[in-house]
Amino acid sequence: MMGITLKANRATVLGHLCRCACWLLALTGSVLVQADVRDIRVWQSPDSTRLVFDLTEPSEHKIFPLSSPSRVVIDLNDAEMLLDTADIDLEGTAVASIRIGHPSKKVLRIVLDLDETLKPSSFPLPPNDVYANHRLVVDLKRPETTQSLSPVKPVKQAETSAAGHRDIIVAIDAGHGGEDPGASGSKGTQEKHVVLAIAKELQALLKKEAGFTPFMVRTGDYYIGLRERTEKARSANSDFLVSIHADAFMQASANGSSVYVLSDRGATSETARWLADKENNADLVGGISLEDKDDHLKMTLLDLSMTYQRNSSKRIGADILGYMKKISYLHKRQVEEAAFVVLKAPDIPALLVETGFISNPEEERKLGTRKYQRQMATAIFNGIKDYFSEHPPSGTLLEAQRQRSQSSGAHSYVIRSGDTLSDLAIKHGVGLNELRRVNGLNSDQIRIGQTIKIPGL
């Protein structure tokens, strides 16, 4: 009996020791996974402020706003601040200062003092190829304002051409931005900077061209959600959306430019999403409200709208490819299809242009030069101009010019590579002097992309 009791006592002691060891291990483990803040990056956009906290480990957190004055509080469990928040550059942002405190022993409190009332939201991000740390992303957004879209695009002072005809509005979306650099080349060239530079070159070309007004979806180094990009284009009453990117591949030999439109599968899924989303019922698609329509009619209207914009997008894409092949090898010689989210506007023709492979050393070098950025923007511009010269939207200056040209028996022609004025005169059976007179030319010099009038017989 004594032997049995001793064994029992020994087992009890060992059990206690085991539990104590497990408790100590758990305690030690909690110390090892302390989620310290290593860095804070702040990105400002016209609509919101984004803060990204680099953490040594993932951490549970709470976030809530306070008023009078406006503040946002972030509580991180088991965390310490490893940097001086006074060194963070907050100039030009909605955050006036960042303070820290400890409401309890295990909680790090971060207080954001704001210059205005903003709505906070947050989400964690795991490490990736660009960022080795766990991250906590905090977005501070201005209160949303409802905006109704007019079925007829409004004539604004900045968008009005001669005789009251409106301009064609082209939304230019520079991909990625802010915390999302996109692809990177071997020399460190980042996609977000390259595509914004090309977008600004395209913006400048469209500003100079009568009958066009550019709308920049992203104007600086900050991130915008994919759905938000298309909504910004729709809210601006855009006639066309072009999203500019630079491709990447694991093999450095991959090269060339390409153009994508929304795939049929992507269009089908987007139609279903719109039908399922009750908030879209009061929206406008192609100038038509879906609010008072039954599901069958909604499906029909959405399908017609998506089909029209995809066909228009393909035509614009083909025109752009025609110019891109003069400055770049084409990775795909025809317009490709893909289910990119940014292309899923149900009533705006939209294209995604891959300007080259930034992962290819030679193309990385070219994409980083102002000369090539301008050439790529010019190719996109010429393709857009060619399409809308032939298919101008209703109520635009280009439509009025086309109607006047047709009524006078004349028609427009866009100069292409190899054209000469004398060859065009012979081809169309028009006298060379008459061709000069109609177009106000003092010489026979013409340039690729130039639109001239061919007088009727």
Image (tube, rainbow, N blue to C red):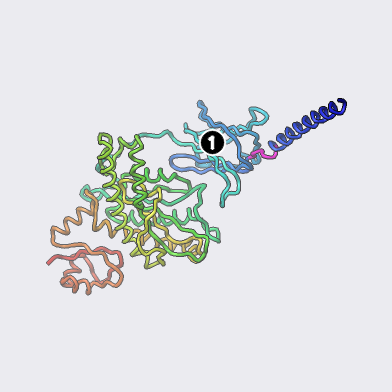
How many neighbours does mark 1 have within 10 angstroms: few (below 14), some (14-19), or many (20 or more)? some
Quadrant where the image shows the C terminus: bottom left
Look at the image and tell me in which quarter the N terminus lies: top right
Q: Is residue 279 above or below residue 188?
A: above
**378 displayed left or right of 141:** left
Residue 129, position in %: x, y?
Answer: 56, 52
Q: Nearer the viewer, residue 97 or 173?
A: 173
Q: Residue at x 27, y 56 (%)?
A: 388
**Whether residue 63 is situated above or below residue 365 in the rendered picture:** above
Queried whether the magenta region covers residue 391, the answer comes back as no
Along the viewing direction, whichever of 36 and 161 lies nearer the viewer = 36
Q: Position of residue 65 (x, y in %)?
A: 51, 29
Q: Quadrant of residue 200?
A: bottom left
Image: 50 above or below 450 = above
Q: Which residues are magenta?
A: 31-36
> What main secondary structure does the magenta stretch of the protein show?
loop
Q: Secondary structure at mark 1?
A: strand
For label 1, the residue is 96
Type of amino acid under label 1: Ala
Q: Quadrant of residue 333?
A: bottom left
Residue 444 image point, x, y percent = 25, 72
User: Which residue is painted at 49% across and 43% down in the image?
Assistant: 44
**Residue 382 seen in this snapshot:** no
